[in-house]
Image (cartoon, rainbow, N blue to C red):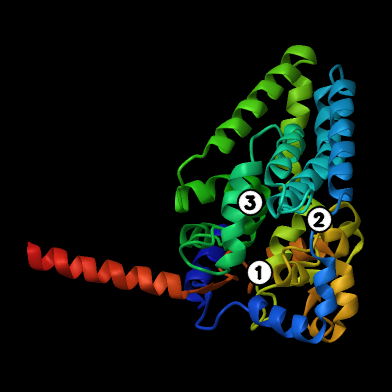
Amino acid sequence: MMLREFLDFFRSNKNDFYWEATDEPHASRRKQILAKYPQIKKLMGHDPRISIQLTIMVFVQLCMSYLVRNMSWMEIIFLSYVVGGTLNHSLSLGLHEVAHNLAFGAHRPFANRLIGFFANLPLGVPASITFRKYHLDHHKYQGDELIDVDLPTKIEGILFSSTIGKFVFIVLQPLFYCLRPVIVLPKKMTFLEILNWTIQVVFDCIIFYTFGIKSLAYLWLGTLLGLGLHPIAGHFIAEHYVFIKGFETYSYYGPLNLITFNVGYHNEHHDFPNIPGYRLPEVKKIAPEFYDNLPCHHSWIKVLYDFITCTEMGPYARVKRKTKYTREWAKASDRQSMLDSKTN
């Protein structure tokens, strides 16, 4: 069955991304909305509820890591998925808010970095600073074939486009999000990244020394399972995978927004990344005519099911574009190649 699916895939024309020559839609829509509803600017800034929610979740995870220290491995795996997976994924989305300086405001960047270090602790692996470094590029260069590392690679498209392959792709999603950026677009490590690593390693050692290996495994498994085949992880697919041709960003309007900083309001977020997630529903309420007619999702579980089972879906179902930056870079490379050939 796997071999037949693999051959059918290569016989189909679904072996490339959706290439667009137009700019990403959010900048132009933002201008239109602000021209009509300038009061939306009042929603911009920071929201203290972010740091409060992050602090509560961190302490819950610390309590859980203490409670599981003497449990069986089966109980730990179950709790890592149900409790730890939910909380760690929610914390990772809190890091997303912090990456945009929405916890303490753009005028207090280091305070945002500090709460990011703190919220990162239960995840077990350092992510806060590295995520921010690449995520801001995703907003500025959405769909750029070189810069937007949120896009799957060609290799991922080849390997994970069958039904079974897509299931594996979902399960291993945390690894792809962790490794893809540093492989596809390596960047120089910064002091803050080193600090993030140092704090995280020290914390993990403290958990191991104080509570034992089961407590540390609970936290690590919570990240691996919570960002993999988990209901909340449907947002990874829901946000930018092309379910309807012509649309590259999708919002989700469902109950899980309550524990994910409204990350489901993704069109609204990309239109206004400097508005905290708590206030994104207000954007849709103020400017409904800009969002009500856009295709959206109402279930992240259904998103995962449709992605895995639909033959039209897969890692290739993403919009890619050659931005002005990319074209200029390519032209410069071509000129350099021509000069090198003449020199040789």
| Label 3 SS | helix
2 to 83, vertically: above or below: below
The structure residue drawn at horizontal position 55% and vertical position 67%, both measured from the top left corner, is 141
**For mark 1, does the 10 Å Cα neighbourhood hold few (<14), some (14 to 19), or many (20 or more) residues?**
many
Circles 2 and 1 in contact, beta carbons < 8 Å: no
Q: Which residue is mark 3?
A: 168
The structure residue drawn at horizontal position 75% and vertical position 34%, both measured from the top left corner, is 118
Please name the amino acid that badge 1 sits on: Tyr
Seen from the viewer's position, the closer of residues 50 and 238 is 50
Please name the amino acid that badge 3 sits on: Val
Seen from the viewer's position, the closer of residues 267 and 311 is 267
User: Which quadrant would the C terminus be assigned to in this image?
Assistant: bottom left
Q: Position of residue 231 (x, y in %)?
A: 81, 54
Q: Which residue is mark 1?
A: 241
Disc ID at residue 46: 2
Q: Is residue 154 visible?
A: yes
Mark 2 / mark 1, whichever is N-terminal: 2
